[in-house]
Image (cartoon, rainbow, N blue to C red):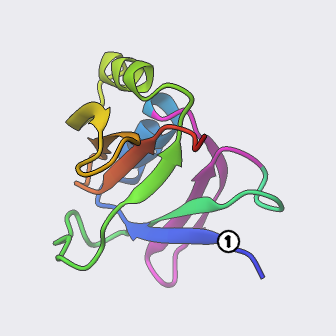
Amino acid sequence: MRMLHTMIRVGDLQRSIAFYTDVLGMQLLRQKDYPEGKFTLAFVGYGDESSNTAIELTHNWDTERYDLGNAFGHIAIEVEDVYKACDDIRAAGGNIVREAGPMKSGATVIAFVEDPDGYKIELLAPKV
């Protein structure tokens, strides 16, 4: 068994694709419209889905905004240098909501960025 993808609902599909590709450096892996169901699925990630986990962006055509609720936590991405990643994301127009630094009660360097729909993405330094 392996993880395939995580699905999140987005209000503006093109804005979300631009964020995940232009700001976080992912690739648009595939996209398909489902006219009868009035939704579009777009998959983004860092490599081929046969060996990498992806994020499924689900856009329901009749919904512009979602309430995030309080059960979902975040998506985590490992980056070589959390401080540099924050600088790069900020320069690309991303919203850093927790600056790079050691996590509370620990030494692991982390940061958080927020996507256009308000989902949190944690940036983590590699484990040593």
The quarter of the picture where the C terminus appears is top right
| Residue found 54% across the figure and 35% down from its top | 79
User: Residue 15's quadrant in the figure?
Assistant: top left
Is 29 contained in the magenta span? yes
| Residue found 60% across the figure and 69% down from its top | 5
Q: Is residue 93 left or right of residue 35?
A: left
Q: Is residue 60 above or below residue 86?
A: below
Q: Is residue 85 above or below residue 34?
A: above
Q: Amino acid at mark 1?
A: Leu
Q: Position of residue 51 (x, y in %)?
A: 81, 59
Q: Crowdedness of circle 1 by 10 Å Cα count: few (<14), some, many (20+)?
A: some
In the rendered picture of this protein, how many numbered marks are placed on residues? 1
* 72, 83: nearer the viewer: 83
What span is in magenta? 24-47
* 123, 35: nearer the viewer: 123
Q: Position of residue 89 (x, y in %)?
A: 37, 26
Q: Is residue 74 above or below residue 95?
A: below
Q: Position of residue 42 (x, y in %)?
A: 56, 59
Residue beneath disc 1: 4
The quarter of the picture where the N terminus appears is bottom right
